[in-house]
Image (tube, grey):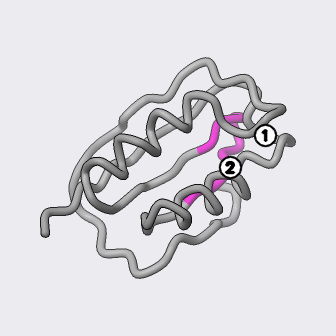
């Protein structure tokens, strides 16, 4: 099986709206591993690892986020690397 690993930055109203918890639950539901965390600059950062179609689905879902989010940008910072067994919520960086 070939996996895709994507490092992303999500901007907009994405803190204080449950975005990290939503991301973790959604990623786990569709079979992804990786992590998510808030950034001190107000963005959310995440790494998604899994089957290419599932990663693409997650990227589309991130454009909307949870109900109270207002996403302005989902930027792919890089691809590759990673070897994650679970999906975790990390501390703010």
Magenta part of the protein: which range? 36-44
Residue at image position (47%, 33%) is: 60
Q: CA distance from mark 1 to mark 2?
A: 7 Å
Q: Residue at x 84, y 41 (%)?
A: 17
Position of the C terminus, as image quadrant, is bottom right
Question: Pointer 1: what residue?
Answer: 15
Name the residue located 40 percent from the left edge and 81 percent from the top edge. Answer: 85
Name the residue nearer the viewer: 3 or 74: 3
Residue 81, how many percent across, how many down? 23, 62
Please indicate whether residue 70 sits to the left or right of residue 16 in the image. Answer: left
Q: How many marks overall?
A: 2
User: In terms of depth relative to the viewer, which is nearer, 54 or 78?
Assistant: 54
41 drawn magenta: yes
Give above or below for 75 relative to 29.
Answer: above
Circle 1 packing at 10 Å, graded few (<14), some (14-19), many (20+), is: some
Q: How many C-alpha atoms fall within 10 Å of the one at disc 2: few (<14), some, or many (≥20)?
A: many
Q: For this rendering, which residue is in front, 78 or 70?
A: 70
Question: Measured from the top left, where is residue 35 in percent x and y?
Answer: 52, 63
- Left or right for 10, reference 58: right
Q: Secondary structure at mark 1?
A: loop
Above or below, 33 against 47 in this view is below
Query: Of the residues under marks 1 and 2, which one precedes in the sequence?
Result: 1
In x, y percent, where is residue 66?
A: 74, 39
Q: Residue furthest top?
A: 72
Tell me which residue sits at (65%, 24%) in the image: 71
Q: Position of residue 49 (x, y in %)?
A: 35, 61
Give the labeled residue for mark 2: 38
Residue 79's tag is none
Q: Determine whether label 1 and label 2 are within 8 Å by CB.
A: yes
Indicate the quadrant where residue 89 lies. bottom right
Instruction: In this rendered view, identify the residue nearer to me: 15 or 86.
Output: 86
Question: Which of the 4 image quadrants contains residue 61?
Answer: top right
């Amino acid at each position: 099986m070939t996996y895709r690993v994507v490092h992303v930055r999500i901007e907009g109203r994405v803190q204080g709206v449950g975005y990290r918890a939503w991301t973790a639950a959604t990623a786990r539901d569709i079979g992804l591993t990786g992590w998510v965390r808030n950034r001190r600059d107000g963005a959310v950062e995440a790494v998604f690892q899994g089957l290419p179609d599932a990663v693409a689905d997650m990227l589309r879902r991130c454009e909307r986020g949870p109900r109270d989010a207002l996403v302005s940008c989902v930027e792919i910072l890089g691809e590759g690397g990673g070897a994650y067994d679970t999906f975790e919520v990390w501390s703010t960086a």
